[in-house]
Amino acid sequence: MTSARKILIVEDERDILELVTHYLEKDGFRVRSATDGPNGLAAARHERPDLIVLDLMLPGMDGLEICRKLRADSATSLTPIMMLTAKTEETDRIVGLELGADDYLTKPFSPKELVARVKALLRRAERREDDGKALLYGSLRLDPVRHEVRVGKQEVTLTAKEFGLLEQLLRNQGRVLTRDVLLNSVWGYDYHGTTRTVDVHVRRLKQKLPLLEEAIISIKSLGYKLRDAGE
Ligand code: CA
């Protein structure tokens, strides 16, 4: 992302709004603001911020109501929301799944803490975006969202484990993945199979995807590596 990321602050207390704005701008963010509920909701919809800092108690419409409306709208359902609250007892509900705030800070808070949390939320959101992107390898394309693998236009049917294995190899091109790492990431930590399971699945993967026959390299007694597509 090259352009500065845009943060919307919805806060009716002037002092806090100015303080937070100052610290975020100092850190290179573009800041938009609103000082009541209805304007905050409208700004969230037309400004399309990368993240929203949302006060809980607001005139016109409270932060929870705004949160609910944003989550219900596909355009804003994934926008990270950092809730500001003066009431500690509300926090369980705020970060609860039904309301969907991603994090919260209780007033009074340190502006530096807020900036750090904002950055952490943005990183998490960006990772989520990256995770959804299709992975390419020559004519092979793996779509993690649609759970689909194609070579050219031809769809290739893989089992869930073969798919997981291929995804790990594609995400780690050029790096050696040990059998244990592959077992843990594809089969899970509670799986008690042997590392031979990995070998069996790699073989099947190569059978189904001949273009990987040479590209997946077995590193003796260690694991596997998918040759970097650029090599
Ligand atoms: Ca308030």
Image (cartoon, rainbow, N blue to C red):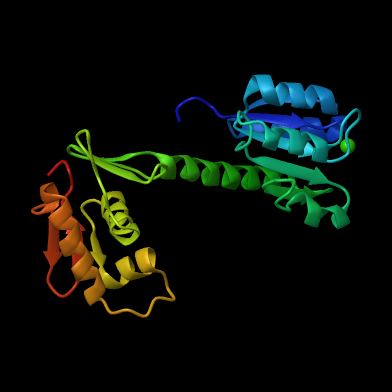
Front position in the image: 140 or 223: 140
Q: Residue at x 84, y 28 (%)?
A: 37
- On the image, the x and y values in percent for residue 81 come to 68, 40
Q: Residue at x 37, y 80 (%)?
A: 192
The answer to whether residue 110 is left or right of residue 120 is right
Q: Determine the quadrant in which ligand 1 lies.
A: top right
- On the image, the x and y values in percent for residue 144 come to 38, 45
- On the image, the x and y values in percent for residue 158 come to 27, 53
- Residue 137 seen in the figure: yes
- In the image, farthest residue toward the left: 214
- The picture quadrant where one finds residue 190 is bottom left
Task: Say above or below: 1 vs 205.
Answer: above
- The picture quadrant where one finds residue 189 is bottom left
- In the image, farthest residue toward the right: 59
- Residue 23 seen in the figure: no
The answer to whether residue 132 is left or right of residue 61 is left
The answer to whether residue 105 is left or right of residue 199 is right
- On the image, the x and y values in percent for residue 115 come to 65, 42
Task: Say above or below: 100 vs 163.
Answer: above
| Image quarter of the C terminus | top left
Question: How many numbered circles does the render carry?
Answer: 0
The answer to whether residue 58 is left or right of residue 70 is right
Q: Residue at x 75, y 38 (%)?
A: 68
